[in-house]
Image (cartoon, rainbow, N blue to C red):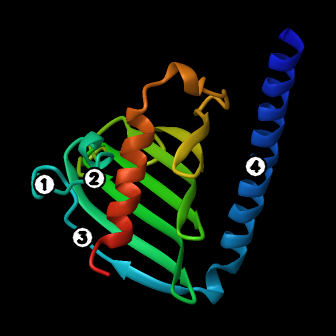
């Protein structure tokens, strides 16, 4: 019985490793192909909880004094491939990149920039900042790996489903915004 359980765990780990490699390959391919994709830009989209409480972006809710949100979508023959969402706040910016294969979310790369002082301040120094990066890997709308800013894998079994649910919800919102 122990041997069967160990075998199942090893096979599951192997398949996830293989899947992560496939996702990384798709990420590279998408980024290399951006110039050949059609690009749709939407500036100053309304996804904040204050302005749109019934249909807001969860990640926008975390930006201190959010000022503007810009969205770029890339399509290959009508199929969504990548969405970039740029949030600009008072002391914080967030750039979220969503990657898709067959209209399904496969990867999200988030770069959060925290500034020491408000950007609108006279003594604002752009280089005085802290950058946090998080990577989220998905398969069939299920979070399969999360790598945090310290390049550590977060134990998915120890996290609540809220993180994945919010990311997927935001992804669907960005795909639908003013098509």
Percent from the top left, x then y, of residue 132? 52, 38
Residue 125 seen from this side: no
Single out the mark in the foreground, 4 or 3.
4
Q: Which residue is mark 2?
A: 57
SS type, badge 4: helix
Labels 1 and 4: the sequence-earlier one = 4
Labels 4 and 3: the sequence-earlier one = 4
Q: Is residue 79 left or right of residue 53?
A: right
SS type, badge 3: loop
Percent from the top left, x then y, of residue 50? 10, 50
Single out the mark in the foreground, 1 or 3.
1
Q: Is residue 81 above or below residue 86?
A: below
Q: Which residue is mark 1?
A: 54
Q: Is residue 174 left or right of residue 89?
A: right
**What residue do we see at 46% from left, 65% from top?**
84
Q: CA distance from mark 4 to mark 2?
A: 28 Å
Label 1 crowd bin: few (<14), some (14–19), many (20+), radius 10 Å:
few
Q: CA distance from mark 1 to mark 4?
A: 35 Å
Instruction: Tell me whether the residue at label 1 lies in contact with that at label 4, contact meaning CB atoms closer than 8 angstroms.
Output: no
Q: Which mark is residue 44?
A: 3
Q: Which residue is mark 4?
A: 19
Q: Quadrant of residue 12?
A: top right
């Amino acid at each position: 019985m122990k041997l069967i359980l160990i075998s199942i765990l090893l096979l599951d780990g192997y398949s996830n490793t293989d899947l992560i490699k496939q996702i990384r390959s798709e990420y590279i391919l998408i980024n290399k192909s951006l110039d050949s994709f059609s690009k749709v830009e939407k500036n100053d989209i309304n996804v904040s909880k204050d302005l749109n409480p019934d249909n807001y972006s969860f990640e926008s809710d975390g930006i201190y004094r959010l000022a503007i949100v810009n969205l770029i979508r890339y399509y290959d023959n009508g199929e969504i491939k990548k969405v970039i969402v740029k949030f600009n706040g008072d002391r914080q910016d967030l750039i979220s990149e969503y990657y898709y294969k067959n209209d399904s979310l496969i990867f999200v790369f988030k770069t959060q920039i925290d500034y020491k002082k408000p950007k609108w301040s006279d003594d604002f120094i752009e280089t005085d900042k802290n950058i946090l990066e998080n990577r989220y890997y998905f398969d069939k709308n299920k979070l399969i790996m999360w790598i945090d800013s310290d390049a550590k894998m977060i134990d998915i079994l120890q996290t609540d489903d809220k993180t994945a649910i919010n990311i997927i919800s935001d992804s669907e919102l960005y795909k639908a915004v003013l098509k």
